[in-house]
Structure formats: C-alpha cells, structure tokens
Image (cartoon, helix red, strand yellow):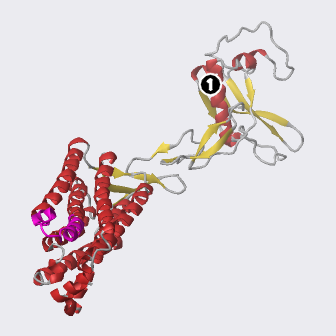
Amino acid sequence: MASSSNVVFIYGDTDSLHEIAVRLLHFVVRGKMLLHHFLKCIDPVNCVSDESCENGANLATEIYDILNFQAFSDEIGILVKVGEVIPGVQRFSINEKKINWPNYFKQIPTSVCSLKCGHGYQKTTLENQPFCCYECNLCPTGKISNQTDAEECLQCSDHQYPNKKKDHCLPRTVTFLAYEEPLGMTLVSAAICFSLLTVLVLGIFLKHRDTPIVKANNRSLSYTLLVSLSLCFLCSLLFIGHPTTATCLLRQTTFAVVFTVAVSSILAKTITVVLAFRATRPGSRLRSWLGSTASYSLIFTCTLIQMCLCGIWLGTYPPFLEMDIHSEPGFIIIQCNEGSLLIFYCVLGYMALLALASFTVAFLARNLPDTFNEAKFLTFSMLVFCSVWISFLPSYQSSKGKTIVALEVFAILTSSAGILTCIFVPKCYVILLRADRNTLEILKRKSTS
C-alpha cells in the first residue's frame, strides 16, 4: 500500500465499481468536484478538515486504495485491499474475486438509479437529474444498438434495415413490379389480351368496311382509334419489369402521346357526328369539314401540342431511375422518378382537357337521329375515361413504391378498355349477330322516323 492515509471506501457491485472509478478519475482530473482535495484533506472517520492541506498538491503521485470491509462470525472484521485508483495517470485496477458482500444485503448495490438499457435502446440523460439517472429510449428508425447502455444508436447502411428488436441490421431485398409475380403476370396478360382483342375488332371493321354501320361515322377515324387503343394497351408493358433509364424516359412520354392520339380521335369523331347532322342542308359549307383531311389535321395538332409538352419535360427535368429505401421497410424499391411533377400533371391535364371537350360535344349530340347514334357511345366512353383518371389522381398521391406503378397500369388498361367496349362492342354486335340491321334501308328508315 503506497499511502495508508489515502483510502477510498466503495460499496457496489463489480460493474458499478468500474463505473465509479472511471467517474472518480474524470472528476479528479478535470477538477469539477475537487474530489482529490476532499479525499486528501478530510478525515472520513472524524470528518475533521486539515487546514494546512494544499489544494491539489501531488496529484500525479497520489494512489488511493479501494478497501472492502469483510466481517466474520465472531464480529471481527478487517479491511481488505481489493484495488487502487491512481488519478494522475487515470488508472484503475480491482480484484473482483476478493470482494465479499455482507449477508444482509438483499441485492448487490448499484451506483446508478436507472436500470441498464438493453440491446435496441439508447441512454437519454434526464434534465435536472444526476448523471447516473437516465431513461432508455428505443432506437429511432433505421438505427440499432448491439450493446448494453449504448450512448447512441448505430445507423444501418442504405442496403440494410433494422430487425424488429433493433439489435442488428438485416440485408434489404430489391423489389419492383416484376413480370414473374402474380400482379405483374395479371397486368401483362390483361394488356396483351386487350391488345389482341382490339386488333380483332380492327380486322372485323376492315372486313366489313363497306357496310353502312362502319361507314356511318368516318371509318378512317375508327381505324386510327383502334390502332391507337392497341398501342395504349401495349405501352402499359413499359411500366412492368426491371426499370431502366430508357424505360423511365419512354414510358410516360409514350403513354402520353399514344393516349392523346386516341382521345383526339374521339374528339374528331364527335365533331364529325355534329357536322354531319348540321351539313344535311343543300349547299352547306360544313360539308368541307367532313373529309378526312380536317379530322386528321385536328388529330395532328392535338398530338403535336402534347409532343411539345413531352419535349419540354425531357429537355428540362426528365424522369430518372432511383432506389427508394424509405417507402417499405426491408426493401429497396427500384422505380422511376417522374422528375418534374408539374410537367407530368400538365401532360395529364392536357389529356383531361381533350377528354372533357369530347365528352361535352358528344353529350350535346346524344339526341341526334339514330343514324348518328355513335354520339351516345362516345359519351359513355368519355364518361368512363374521365371517371378512371379522376379516381387515379388521389390514389397516386397516397400510394408508394410499386403500388403506384400497378395503379397507373390499371388506369391505362381500364380507360382503354372502357373506350373499346363503349364504342365498338355495340357495332360488332350488329355486324356479327344482327346483320339484318346493318343495311342502308334500315338506316334511312330510322333517320326519317
């Protein structure tokens, strides 16, 4: 024993002894509590202060013994040295095997007033409380702690995520709307089937192109509409599968342009219906607008405006490939970021404007004679189209990850199928099953009735 007068009595468990010693050294070296002065200048038994003691003298050479009082059955007790503290060099040593606790201790004393923080938790200091008092808080999102009484949690890497107990990181799974999964297979099958069905309807119209019901409302526009609808179904395939930079750039612009052709074709058909009824008077100037040239000029103009919007989109802030690690825990979602949401909504808004114009004109022309009753079918098709995309927008805003892609593909397929069904199914029914109604005499009779 280097100095018999320098003695520290500490009662606590072995873990607490380490904590106490470290904190003693901390306060001695930094002078926060003048612990050295207290231990050197005050008799711990008689509480008598030595006034001649110098403050902080010989700090580097002092050695403090840690003694453990051990009592025997005959009430004889001795002090046994179990360790020492050297403040000057910040060294602490203790022999845990020599410590003997009294039998009347119900539990080993502890030097802290809070329970230990287990794995997955971090210590948080309490305000206006001693430093040994703290509370245990669960690690925040994306972080773990794999040791007891962790001061702070560790951040998992971008390719990992915490387990439920937040005590270790697990590898993330890369995911996207794949062709192999049930949802992807269902959407792909639906897109291909509807596209083939549209081609079949186009074949029926080409085969019966000289019949009155095909010629009644500008058959060239019907062909254009059917071709664009078939492409609409197929363009949904760009949204499925592993995204790439090329598919991110093509899928929204291709969808926008092809859909604009389809909707502008419907607008041209509705205008043709109205003009055909108005141009029945002899010498009417409206007859010059009934030809294919005027209709295709309208389609070209509407499509050109949409192409300009898409060009501005690709030239300023185009869509790009990104990895989303925040939407779904445990997954890395590979998806396409739309880039400029403002231009994206402008593209959708332009298509909505064309659809609204088509719906309005078709609705106003719904009561024209039966010869031109396609206006009723056009009205229903635009009603379905608008309903689908109005429902899509709030769902798009509230969804995350590959659910957004599935919703957009579903909206494309549903709106295209609605147009195909409402406009062409009634005509195919007459062509294939009611050929007796597909005659010029029937149409003239209905128009004059």
Which type of secondary structure does the marked residue at label 1 adopt? Answer: helix
Q: Is 145 located above or below residue 63 in the figure?
A: below
Query: Whole-percent x and y of residue 6?
Result: 73, 21
Query: Whole-percent x and y of residue 156?
Result: 44, 47
Q: Is 129 located above or below residue 319 in the figure?
A: above
Amino acid at the residue labelled 1:
His
- Secondary structure predominantly adopted by residues drawn in magenta: helix
Magenta span has 202? no
Residue 439 seen: no
The residue depicted at 30 percent of the width and 60 percent of the height is: 357
Q: Give residue 386's quadrant in the image.
A: bottom left
The residue depicted at 66 percent of the width and 26 percent of the height is: 24
Observer-nearest residue: 348 or 115?
348
To which residue does mark 1 refer?
26
Observer-nearest residue: 233 or 265?
265
State the quadrant of the N terminus: top right
Q: Is 447 located above or below residue 59 in the figure?
A: below
Horizontal side of 283 relative to 312 (left or right) equals left
- In the rendered structure, which segment of residues is drawn in magenta? 268-292
| Residue neighbourhood size for the residue with mark 1, other residues' Cα within 10 Å, grouped as few (<14), some (14–19), many (≥20) | some
| Residue lying farthest to the top in this orientation | 52
Query: Whole-percent x and y of residue 107?
Result: 78, 47
Q: Give residue 433's quadrant in the image.
A: bottom left
Query: Whole-percent x and y of residue 247?
Result: 22, 57
Magenta span has 282? yes
Q: Give residue 188's quadrant in the image.
A: bottom left
Observer-nearest residue: 147 or 262?
262
| Residue lying farthest to the front in this orientation | 282
Observer-nearest residue: 104 or 136?
136
